[in-house]
């Protein structure tokens, strides 16, 4: 089925291949889920090849008859057959610059956008009929097994295992299994971006979800009406062990599953691995080694706040310090640190956990997130009685966290007295150190970033190598906005300035914004101007 069948039908009407009256009559005979295109082909109204030619012409692509020539075996061997079958493409040529591939649906924008990134190189698309493509795939990439209907049978187990192994090999942070009207879409989040990697028949949704629930041990296979959470631990083919946090949500097309891969390499991170430039690293190092006070890390979901907190704990974890954390959930077990799991259903809230933790005489407390006034108030009091408190808030920039705490009911004079610093952060993709190349800022990039250039400004640009799979980018790093609560800033907090006014005064006192820190990292050759523009769009002012 084409991803935009109605559009293709309009094109066929425009081409004079079929009239509107005939289409209306056919639609009246079919259910909304049936494919009109399939009906036209099956009942000999039009051939699959003609429909593919119309689709190709209107997509500015060339039509290819896959039954009329042989593909070079070397090109076939260069592509994984499982990948070709799942995504639905066939490699047919290679001109040295781009890989030429045949697809059957030129309107599937996600495939067009994600396949070049997934393959790590430029792609030229050709259009073949669906029947022609399936015959060619069966010829060049014959399947040794067919998928079973039951979740306990080997093919489903193999499918899920392959998904986990591929996700790990591609340094994926999240796996998304999404039920669509006519298929099951699999997407990986790689370096912060979602990439479509597979499509499975709609009938496989139940077996796949059931297999994942069995693996999690804490989720009910029978329950499909309410969200569920679980955890999976497994060993991969390469000998690595990974943990996954699993979440299911019922949708109108079935259960949607998202799995966060808990990367244990985060356990070994210290401050140098977060992406600080040397001056900011020295500043943050001094702040987190203060004997008391509140240090807040802010940013939206997925901005790396938890990773930063774990790096701080690693940095501070010494035999002479007692550290206790309250987390929802506990993602990683840290040696030498007391970790408390938040369980709101039995009354173990952040506030309740924090009260109990204070009776354990800790030196350092980490609270996964300050979500309400009660937790915020206890955290402030803990800081004022000699504890160092590390936590996160959901705010877009650092100075606006003051207003957020005030909105929770914390008096401004307490905020000014207890908070030592607030750091906002985002994650941006890093240039591959193995293949980055010399480049320069364009006038448009410089203008967007607010850089006045009278002469060419040299920066680095993406290259492409085996290490980064041809993308030129590998991994992510943080960009930071460190708002230190100095004596001058305490006076500003107590004067009830708005967030905008406080931000303006903080910048006058020397605070660098997220975009300004990003620009420094562009000029240092760590990332690209386009990446910083993308990540800091909301920080442009």
Image (cartoon, helix red, strand yellow):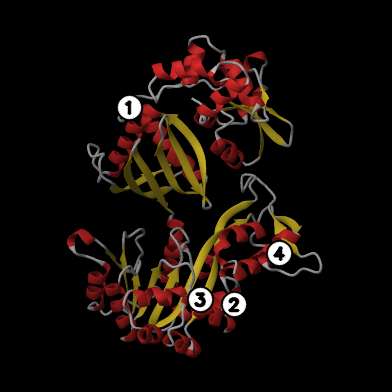
Disc on res. 279: 2
Q: Are marks 2 and 1 in contact (CB under 8 Å)?
A: no
| Residue 372 lies in quadrant | bottom left
Q: State the residue at coordinates (64%, 25%).
A: 56
**Camera-nearest residue between 240 and 529:** 529
Q: Are marks 3 and 4 in contact (CB under 8 Å)?
A: no
State which tag comes first along the sequence, 2 or 1.
1
Whole-percent x and y of residue 468? 61, 48
Q: CA distance from mark 1 to mark 4?
A: 58 Å
Q: CA distance from mark 4 to mark 2?
A: 26 Å
Q: Are marks 1 and 4 in contact (CB under 8 Å)?
A: no
Query: Left of 483 or right of it: where is 293?
Result: left
Q: Which residue is mark 3?
A: 500
Depth check, mark 2 against mark 3: the one in front is 3
Q: CA distance from mark 2 to mark 3?
A: 26 Å
Q: Which residue is mark 1?
A: 153
Q: Name the element at disc 4.
A: helix
Query: Left of 157 or right of it: where is 122?
Result: right
Q: Residues within 10 Å of mark 1 (few under 14, many from 20)?
A: few
Q: Which residue is mark 4?
A: 447
Q: State the residue at coordinates (56%, 16%).
A: 18
**Camera-nearest residue between 279 and 483:** 483
Q: CA distance from mark 3 to mark 1?
A: 59 Å
State which tag comes first along the sequence, 1 or 4.
1
Is 535 placed above or below 466 here? below
């Amino acid at each position: 089925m084409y991803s935009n069948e109605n559009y293709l039908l309009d094109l066929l009407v425009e081409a004079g291949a079929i009239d509107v009256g005939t289409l209306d009559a056919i639609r009246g005979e079919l259910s909304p889920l049936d494919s009109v295109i399939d009906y036209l082909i099956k009942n000999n109204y039009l051939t699959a090849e003609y429909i593919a030619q119309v689709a190709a012409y209107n997509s500015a692509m060339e039509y290819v008859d896959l039954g009329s020539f042989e593909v070079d075996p070397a090109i076939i061997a260069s592509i994984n057959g499982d990948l070709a079958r799942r995504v639905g493409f066939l490699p047919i040529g290679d001109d040295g610059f781009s890989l030429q591939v045949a697809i059957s649906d030129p309107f599937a924008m996600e495939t067009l956008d994600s396949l070049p990134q997934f393959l790590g190189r430029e792609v030229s698309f050709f259009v073949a009929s669906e029947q022609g493509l399936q015959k060619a795939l069966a010829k060049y990439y014959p399947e040794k097994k067919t998928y079973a209907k039951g979740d306990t049978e080997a093919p489903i187990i193999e499918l899920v295992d392959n998904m986990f192994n591929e996700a790990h090999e591609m340094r994926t942070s999240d796996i998304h299994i999404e039920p669509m009207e006519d298929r099951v879409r699999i997407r990986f989040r790689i370096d912060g971006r979602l990439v479509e990697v597979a499509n499975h028949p709609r009938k496989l949704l139940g077996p796949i979800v059931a297999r994942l629930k069995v693996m999690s041990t804490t989720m009910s296979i029978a329950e499909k009406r309410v969200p569920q959470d679980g955890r999976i631990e497994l060993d991969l083919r390469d000998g690595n062990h990974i943990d996954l946090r699993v979440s299911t949500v019922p949708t109108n097309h079935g259960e949607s599953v998202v799995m966060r891969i808990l990367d244990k390499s985060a356990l070994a991170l210290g401050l140098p691995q977060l992406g600080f430039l040397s001056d900011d690293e020295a500043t943050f190092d001094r702040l987190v080694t203060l004997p008391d006070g509140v240090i807040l890390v802010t940013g939206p979901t997925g901005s790396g706040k938890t990773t930063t907190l774990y790096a701080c704990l690693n940095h501070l974890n010494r035999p002479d310090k007692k550290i206790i954390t309250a987390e929802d959930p506990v993602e990683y077990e840290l040696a030498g640190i007391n970790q408390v799991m938040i369980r709101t259903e039995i009354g173990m809230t952040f506030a309740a956990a924090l009260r109990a933790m204070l009776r354990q005489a800790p030196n350092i407390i980490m609270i996964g997130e300050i979500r309400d006034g009660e937790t915020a108030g206890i955290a402030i009091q803990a800081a004022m009685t000699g504890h160092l408190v590390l936590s996160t808030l959901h705010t877009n920039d650092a100075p606006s966290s003051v207003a957020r705490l005030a909105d929770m009911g914390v008096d401004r004079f307490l905020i000014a007295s207890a908070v030592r610093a607030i750091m906002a952060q985002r994650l941006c993709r890093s240039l591959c150190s193995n293949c980055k190349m010399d480049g320069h800022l364009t006038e448009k990039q410089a203008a967007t970033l607010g850089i006045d250039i009278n002469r060419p400004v040299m920066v680095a640009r993406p290259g492409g190598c085996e290490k980064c799979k041809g993308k030129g980018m590998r991994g992510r790093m943080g960009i930071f906005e460190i708002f230190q609560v100095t004596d001058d800033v305490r006076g500003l907090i107590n004067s009830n300035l708005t967030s905008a006014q406080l931000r303006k005064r903080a910048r006058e006192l020397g605070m660098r914004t997220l975009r300004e820190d990003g620009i420094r990292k562009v000029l240092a050759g760590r990332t690209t101007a386009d990446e910083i523009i993308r990540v800091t769009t909301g920080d442009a002012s």
